[in-house]
Amino acid sequence: MIRFSATLLLACSLTLCAQGKKTIFVITDAEGVAGICRQEQTDKKDPELRQLLAGEVNAAVQGFYDGGADEVIVWDGHGGSSTLSVATIHPRAKLVIGYIGARYTFDRHYTALAFVGQHSRANTRKGIMSHSYNSLGIQNMLLNGKPIGEIEAATALAGVYGIPAILLTGDNAATEEMRAIVPNVETAAVKEGLQRYACISLSAEAARSTIREAARRSMSKIGQIRPYKITGPATIEIEHTTRNSLGTDAELIPGTKVIDDRTIQYSGKDFLEAWLRYRFR
Ligand SMILES: [Zn+2]
């Protein structure tokens, strides 16, 4: 009984259990959804995408509730936040619609972070439609010299606020990218990339049951998975594509260094400061 209490106390200190309520924040995207392998399928109004994405999101939501979640908040992260609808979202989920700011609302101190339908970072070999935030505008994104994408940026931002990432669903490449920074995270790979626009995919039904089960399992890892933290001063370097080269006054932005016509570096005393400099430029 004493051992049980000690374990519980440790889990609580890591998960803000003192507040009692377990709230899971889900970031959604399109390129990592089962059956989505070509660019035209990612159109935010594409009926098949909307159906497949909602199916995976709802499977994850159900899995979180199966595993003991009290609240699941889903941010519609693809296509200007207009791919999901309250008409088709899980009845017990809340949907965040619109731009959520540079901090992804993590200052609301959710219990855990999850990704559904996620793709890998720019330049990933066999990563289906791999990119970092902007496939047409950004060639490469580096954090302290290391290539990153949406997975690592969001996971590190959550880490700033003590929130661990517990689940990622997407293609094989995205799940590998996630495990490279959070080794004990739960993942569900719903398709394998053959090349940028070719894949072998699970059926929607198989993807949903895999995701629901992974989400349920991920709840039991709350308290075991530590928030992912970037320590010390940080630089974020953005290498734009040629069509998005730097404006004439790029040098005037505080905390920045222009590397070349397409590349700019933002620095800060820590990751959050560098990130905010980049996002509020
Ligand atoms: Zn994305």
Image (spheres, grey):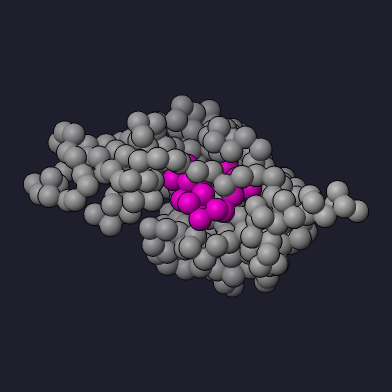
Asked if residue 158 is positioned above or below residue 89 in the image, the reply reads: above
- 193 vs 43, left or right, is right
Residue placed farthest to the left in the image?
Answer: 248
> Front-most of 98 and 110?
110
Indicate the quadrant containing the C terminus: top left, top right, bottom left or bottom right: bottom left
How many marks the image carries: the answer is: 0
Residue 170, horizontal then vertical, whole percent: 57, 42
Residue 100, horizontal then vertical, whole percent: 42, 64
Q: Does the magenta stretch include residue 188?
A: no
Stretch of the chain drawn in magenta: 151-170
Asked if residue 22 is positioned above or below residue 135 in the image, the reply reads: below
Residue placed farthest to the right in the image?
Answer: 1
Query: Residue, x 78% and y 54% (percent of image)?
Result: 8
Give the quadrant of residue 123.
top left
Query: Residue, x 66% and y 67% (percent of image)?
Result: 19
Give the quadrant of residue 174.
top right
> Front-most of 243 and 102?
102
- 78 vs 266, left or right, is right
> Front-most of 200 and 276?
276
- 235 vs 3, left or right, is left
